[in-house]
Amino acid sequence: MTTFLSLTVSAITIMTPLLLASTGGLFTELSGMLNISLEGLMLIGAFATIVGVHFSNSLVVGMIIGIISAMILASILASIVLYLKANVFITGLAANLFASGMTVVLSFYLFNNKGVITFDNLPVIPKLFLDLSKKIPVVGPIFFGHTFFTYLSVILLILASIIIYRTPFGFRLRAAGLYPKSLSSIGISYKKYRFFAFLISAFYSAIAGAMLSMNLGAFVPNITSGKGWIALVVIFLGQKRPAGLIIASLIFGFSEAFSNYAQGVWSIPSDFILAIPYLFTLVAIILFSIYEYNKKRVE
């Protein structure tokens, strides 16, 4: 496998949790709310899922536990923001800090360990269409041979696109973000749709977190490593459109895949190399801000 092909396959794996989390965050963004709690929702989902799988020996049960756990946190966050009128940024940041601390506390309570928790005898996450990845030259490994999480992320993105642009719920969700007063004038509560948007974002983020912990076969404190924040950048770089999310997620996937590859090639401190994805995130958001500023000036 050539270096570029290897990087592409790695980038697709890396982009999957970003695509899932950004798809969930798209719902809250379109509803008119900035959801910076994606990091915390992913973290809760990652922890609850792998613990649920450990005790139930079922991936499905574990993922359901992870999704419910993330939704509980999201419902508390949404209630505080929408009905107690707390600042959404501060509340979201508090949710992230809560998730970071709570997972460590629960790790110690359940396993007497505040560090890395490894789990034996976890169900193996199968890779799908392996035969096709071997039979089809060049593009085979790119489109086939990934875990079901990767294919699920694309299916859920398509589903999100249908919901947002082809259903009354999606129409009202977008109206809650663009014309909340108009929505209220016809007797529809925009807060209800924003609340549902938070729950949907928790659903997607929990699956993203589940992929991180299940692929690793262990839970590491702060396993998300800023991926929730990068997912926020993906939403804006993707122009708040489902198709754009795939492109932006893949770009960030390539940046991290390249940093992983560079560790074995470049003779410079690994800390600098590992900072490449975050440096790329910073540059990307600066360039996007400049683009948006110039666009508004032209208009």
Image: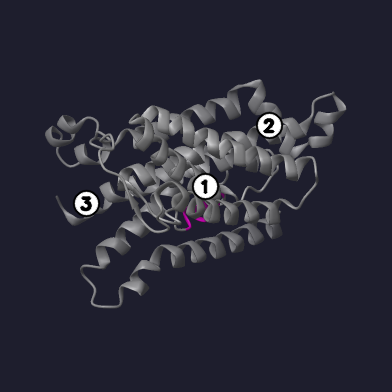
Quarter where residue 71 is shown: top right
Residue neighbourhood size for the residue with mark 1, other residues' Cα within 10 Å, grouped as few (<14), some (14–19), many (≥20): some
Quarter where residue 170 is shown: top right
In percent of width and height, residue 151 lies at 35, 33
> Who's the residue at 45% across and 37% down the image?
207
Q: How is the image coloured?
A: one colour
Residue neighbourhood size for the residue with mark 3, other residues' Cα within 10 Å, grouped as few (<14), some (14–19), many (≥20): some
296 over 12 or under it: above or below: below
Amino acid type at circle 1 is Gly
Looking at the image, which is closer to me, 195 or 139?
A: 195
Residue neighbourhood size for the residue with mark 2, other residues' Cα within 10 Å, grouped as few (<14), some (14–19), many (≥20): many
Q: Is residue 228 magenta?
A: yes
Circle 1 sits in a helix, a strand or a loop, which is it? loop
| Circle nearer the viewer, 2 or 1 | 2
Q: Is residue 150 magenta?
A: no
Circle 3 sits in a helix, a strand or a loop, which is it? helix
> Who's the residue at 24% across and 31% down the image?
128
The tag on residue 6 is: 3
* Main secondary-structure element of the magenta-colored stretch: helix
Q: Which residue is mark 1?
A: 238
Find out whether the residues at labels 1 and 3 contact each other: C-beta distance under 8 Å: no
* Among numbered discs 2 and 1, the one appearing first in the sequence: 2
Circle 2 sits in a helix, a strand or a loop, which is it? helix
| Span colored in magenta | 226-235
**Distance from label 3 to label 2 (Cα)?**
40 Å
In percent of width and height, residue 13 lies at 32, 45
Looking at the image, which is closer to me, 18 or 117?
A: 117
In percent of width and height, residue 197 lies at 64, 35
* Among numbered discs 1 and 3, the one appearing first in the sequence: 3
Q: Which residue is mark 2?
A: 173
**Distance from label 1 to label 3 (Cα)?**
25 Å
